[in-house]
Image: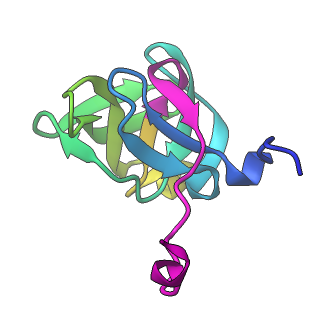
Amino acid sequence: MSDALTPQEMAFACGGCETPLFQSKDIITTILSGAMGKSLLVRNPTNIAFSSGEKEIRLTTGMHRTRDIECLTCHKPLGWYYVKAYEADQKFKEGAYLIEKALLVPVKPQAAPSVFSFLWKQ
């Protein structure tokens, strides 16, 4: 059996401290750019904290209201959260997180323990 993971099984962690953040299934799109280049738009990441208040910014896709996000563990900046998109074709970003790819490391996702796992322990 191979140890290789399919793209659907990948997980991503903070590049600063390797705290788990999200799995591939949480990615909405991979075609966005952030301040550092290629970025991922993600729903429902874990271990994320808001690092500042809301701000209005003009991006290449129009005006947005955002909040900066950081790793909950090491407080390394990771990207931003889309509070509001003012352009109709950008509404899909609302409630999602833009996370810079350069600030992530791929990791093997943790398997959920089985309710019967205690039977196999010696």
Q: From this viewpoint, which residue is outermost toward the top? A: 36
Position of 32 relative to 8 (above/below): above
Position of 10 relative to 37 (above/below): below
Q: Quadrant of residue 95?
A: bottom left
Q: From this viewpoint, which residue is outermost toward the right? A: 1
Measured as percent of width and height from the top left, residue 114 is found at 53, 79
Q: Mark yes or no: residue 87 visible.
A: no
The front one of 6 and 37 is 6
The front one of 98 and 8 is 8
Q: Residue at x 33, y 43 (%)?
A: 81
Based on the picture, tell me whether residue 90 belongs to the magenta stretch.
no
The front one of 54 and 48 is 48
Measured as percent of width and height from the top left, residue 107 is found at 56, 37
Q: Residue at x 21, y 28 (%)?
A: 74
Measured as percent of width and height from the top left, residue 70 is found at 25, 33
Q: How many labels were placed on the picture?
A: 0
Magenta highlight range: 99-122
Q: From this viewpoint, which residue is outermost toward the front? A: 122
Q: Residue at x 42, y 23 (%)?
A: 15
Left/right of residue 104 with respect to residue 95 in the rendered view: right
Q: Residue at x 16, y 40 (%)?
A: 54
Position of 108 relative to 95 (above/below): above
Q: Quadrant of residue 118?
A: bottom left
The front one of 24 and 56 is 24
Q: Colour scheme of this structure image? A: rainbow
Q: Mark yes or no: residue 113 visible.
A: yes
Position of 97 relative to 75 (above/below): below
